[in-house]
Image (cartoon, grey):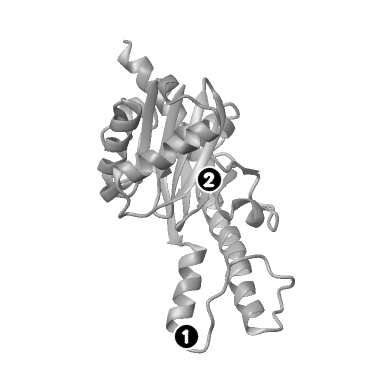
Amino acid sequence: MLLTVDVGNTNLVFGVFNGESLIQSWRLATLRERTADEIGILLSDLFQARGLDKAEIDGVIMASVVPSLTGTMSEMIRRYFDRQTKIVNPAEDAALTGMPIRYDRPSEVGADRLVNGIAAYERFGRADGRPVIIVDFGTATTFDCISTRGEYLGGVICPGVDISADALFERAAQLPRVDVCKPKRVIGRTTVESMQSGLFYGYVAMVEGIEARLRDELEATPGGGTPICVATGGMAAVVAEQTSVIEAVVPELTLYGLRIVWERFLSKMST
């Protein structure tokens, strides 16, 4: 069995795979002050509650965009699982991941963006020879583009919807803090409804607008083709309901990408 770990700015996401099947996943809040022991005890309790045996974990792979927690998580795995952690490094693991990076500076590509691209391309793009656009609704809302040849081309990084909501509250003295959710109607009849409409439908429109421009650019490149748009992250499902540009939603896309990279890592180690 494989333990996959996605260390994000908002959540720590853990997934347990038995072969190709994701049999369990958990989300914990990303708190940078947590120690290896605190996270280890929490994860041990989660394993026990689901009847899973930590001793059956054969390998661990991690994507982290929070450098201050990378070492903490590796130490937790060593103490509580007695395993070394494979940490995905986009700049160093190009041959291992099997996805060439066309970014001007490969070291600037987040590990989560790369493994999302790998998972989406393998699942939706490779068989049909289509490029892929991945929209990840995380702390930041990111758009990543994969070519028909399975190359990571780059993308777009926007403030996440929660960041925008917080900024609106902090910078406008008379506006309250609101939860971001789909409102009953576009025309808000209270301040809160108006803010929710602006945040939610503003992001729907942003996704549609950026996706259209990315689609045009991908189709215009040599060997382009019509891309498929795949969404993941917290707001993916609810936004996808409001637009036709998102064709598939995969909530645990990063974990599936980590599993693929792990299989390639094992294959390389055996040769």
Give the alpha-carbon distance from disc 2 to disc 1, as whole Å: 34 Å
Residue marked by disc 2: 133
> Mark 2 Cα within 10 Å, few/some/many (few <14, many 20+)?
many
The kind of residue tagged 1 is Ala
Place of residue 124 in the rendered image (x, y in percent of width and height, measured from the top left): 59, 33
- Residue drawn at point x = 67 percent, y = 65 percent: 182
- Residue 144 lies, with reference to residue 238, above or below; the image says above
Can residue 106 be spotted in the picture? Answer: no
- Residue drawn at point x = 56 percent, y = 63 percent: 206
Residue marked by disc 1: 172
- Residue drawn at point x = 64 percent, y = 51 percent: 237
Mark identifier at residue 26: none
Dot 2 falls on a residue whose secondary structure is: strand
Dot 1 falls on a residue whose secondary structure is: loop
Direction right: furthest residue: 184
| Viewer-nearest residue: 98 or 256 | 256
The kind of residue tagged 2 is Ile
Query: What is the quadrant of residue 5 in the picture?
Result: top left
Can residue 21 be spotted in the picture? Answer: yes
| Viewer-nearest residue: 253 or 132 | 253
| Viewer-nearest residue: 265 or 106 | 265
Q: Are marks 2 and 1 in contact (CB under 8 Å)?
A: no
Ranked by sequence position, the earlier of labels 2 and 1 is 2
Position of the C terminus, as image quadrant, is top left
